[in-house]
Image: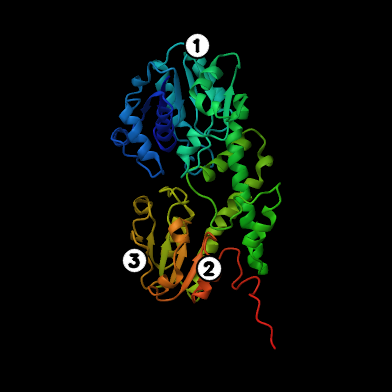
Amino acid sequence: MRLSVIGCGYLGAVHAACMAKLGHEVVGIDVDGAKVAALSAGDAPFFEPGLPELLAEALETGRLRFSTDIADAAGSAVHFIAVGTPQKRAENGADLSHVYAGVDALLPHVNAGDVVVGKSTVPVGTARDLSVRISEACPSVTLAWNPEFLREGFAVKDTLEPDRLVYGLDDAASGAQLILDEVYAQALAGGTPRLVMDYETAELVKVSANAFLATKISFINAMAEVCEATGADVSMLADAIGHDARIGRKFLNAGLGFGGGCLPKDIRAFMARAGELGADQALTFLREVDSINMRRRARMVDLAREVCGGSLLGQRIAVLGLAFKPNSDDVRDSPALSVAAQLQLQGAAVTATDPQAVPNASRRFPDLAYTASVEEAVQNADAVLVLTEWEQYCALNPMDLRALVARPAIVDGRNCLDPVAWRDAGWTYRALGRPKAAAVPAPTAAVR
């Protein structure tokens, strides 16, 4: 089947490459000429494991190409709208200008029977409005809403092997469902659940999932605040409550909290839309979810100050991790980068590193000192902060690192290190939601 993907950012580029992998003929369209040129050369403009290889393979087959000309969408039977919906400046609401611009630019090039498929995360009610817009211009063209559920670092797998497919349709008899079934035939044959529903419910599936995930993360971080006040251990607490099948252990890792280009702006847009609909009281809890998330960053700065003896002025701080999560170079609303910048503003001399995110971070905060090497970052440091749980940081040897620092003090912003190993190696170990010493002291030998 011939497909077009309008918007070749993170979502669109991954979707286009994966659809070509599934055997479809795909054209990805974007207004950014530099991005299109890079993708056409097989160079992903962002870090995503597996995507460069997938791009190379799809381009080699001839089933994938990229263009800046929206007219190249003509002849495709399905047109995916995968543009960004960033947060508005000085507001919580989502900026939908790219969505409407993309649809308006596409409509002169669609044919009777085509299906326009929304994948962007939008406030509830957007699809209904777009369907009216499309039907007025092209009565024989159908709109479907097919939200994405990608995790950065696992986007290729999540696209090729989704855990569910959601179709938002205005009319189940329109034929759009059969066309989408053909697009996703491989996943459906593999047993992926397909849920067919109205536009509004389909839109709410994505934002509700994000809101629930954000709430779960902020819940355990709220418990971390209580643990810090009482001397309890939040990691042990999470292990214990995670055994309850109704709760589960996933996403109960206390730490710096969530960031990136989706969760923060999506829950804020959800609150804003609820207010517009007169249902703002239903989502007031999300304000506290957002507040808890932001407080973790300030608390991390406090812990850094604590291990530095009460002042950050002139202290050499090594920051390990800048991306908002491992296996990504995304620093949008990154807690790690935010903490690094705050430390610098409060007088510390910060040297930061990350396996992938240094170029993006340096563009956002050029005043920080950056290096590609952990060893260079920690050289003569008064404190080391682990702010993104990259595998190589979790596996650091505390004895090797101790030989490089001026003061063996480490703050674990992701609760990803073994406190016993670091303390046994002579380090001062501090972490969000964990006591200054072991919660349960090791047993001592009986006195004879």
Is tag 3's residue or tag 2's residue first in the polypeptide sequence? 2
Between 294 and 382, the one nearer to me in the picture: 382
Residue at 63% x, 36% y is: 274
Secondary structure state at the residue bearing disc 3: helix
Q: Which residue is mark 2?
A: 303
Query: Disc 3 and disc 2: Cα gap in Å?
Result: 23 Å
Of the residues tagged 3 and 2, which is closer to the observer? 3
In the picture as drawn, the residue positioned furthest to the front comes out as 448
Image coordinates for residue 264, horizontal then vertical, percent: 53, 46
Q: Which residue is mark 3?
A: 376
Q: Which residue is mark 1?
A: 140
Residue at 48% x, 34% y is: 159
Image coordinates for residue 185, horizontal then vertical, percent: 51, 24
In the depicted structure, whether residue 149 falls above or below residue 184: below
Circle 2: residue type: Leu
Circle 1: residue type: Ser
Instruction: Give the position of the N terminus as an image quadrant.
Output: top left
Q: Is residue 259 left or right of residue 443?
A: left
Q: Is residue 67 visible?
A: no
Mark 3 closeness class: few <14, some 14–19, many ≥20 residues within 10 Å:
some
- Is mark 3 in CB contact (under 8 Å) with mark 2? no
Image quadrant in which you'd find residue 174: top right
What color scheme is it?
Answer: rainbow
Secondary structure state at the residue bearing disc 1: loop
Residue at 54% x, 42% y is: 92
Image coordinates for residue 158, horizontal then vertical, percent: 50, 37
Q: Is residue 198 visible?
A: yes
Image coordinates for residue 433, horizontal then vertical, percent: 60, 63
Instruction: Give the position of the C terminus as an image quadrant.
Output: bottom right
